[in-house]
Amino acid sequence: MARNFPHSYVVCTCKNVTLGEIIHAIKERGAKTLDDLDNLTDAGSCCGSCKNAQSDIGAEKMELYLEEILNKFNGK
Ligand code: FES
């Protein structure tokens, strides 16, 4: 994730989940996988486009994916 997004940036537009909520779920609540994020924040539980580029079926592509955030904070 080379770009910088504000914590208020909405990563999952279906469920209106922000980057700040995702980071909180990863750092404070131990989310390690896309399923964990789904369970803890609801992110990715609707169309799935926000999960990763492969799942992005939207006409307009997402700028930031849940998988990128997980990878960054889980040190991959
Ligand atoms: S944008 Fe996240 S599930 Fe649709």
Image: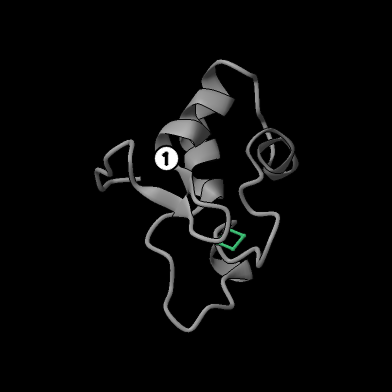
Which of 12/55 is in front? Answer: 12
According to the picture, the residue beneath numbered tag 1 turns out to be 19
* Residue at 28% in and 46% down: 2
Residue 26: x and y in percent read 57, 26
Residue plotted at (67% across, 30% down): 32
Q: Quadrant of the N terminus?
A: top left
Residue at image x 50%, y 24%? 24
* Residue 24 position (above or below residue 16): above
Between residue 53 and residue 37, name the one nearer to us.
37
Q: Secondary structure at mark 1?
A: helix
Colour pattern of the rendering: one colour
Residue 36 quadrant: top right
Q: Tell me if 29 is positioned left or right of 73 in this view.
A: right
Residue 34 is situated, as x and y percent measured from the top left of the image, at 68, 44
Work out which residue is located at the far top of the displayed protein and give it. 28
Q: Residue at x 68, y 33 (%)?
A: 40
Q: Tell me which amino acid carries mark 1.
A: Leu
Q: Counting other residues with Cα less than 10 Å from the Cα at mark 1, is it few (<14), some (14-19), or many (20 or more)?
A: many
Q: How many marks?
A: 1
* Camera-side residue of 74 and 27: 27
Ligand 1 positioned in quadrant: bottom right
Query: Residue 74 location in percent, x, y?
Result: 55, 28
61 w.r.t. 20: above or below? below
Q: Is 49 drawn above or below residue 28 in the view shown?
A: below
- Left or right, 2 with respect to 60, comes to left
Residue 64 at x, y = what percent? Answer: 41, 55
19 with respect to 71 (left or right): left
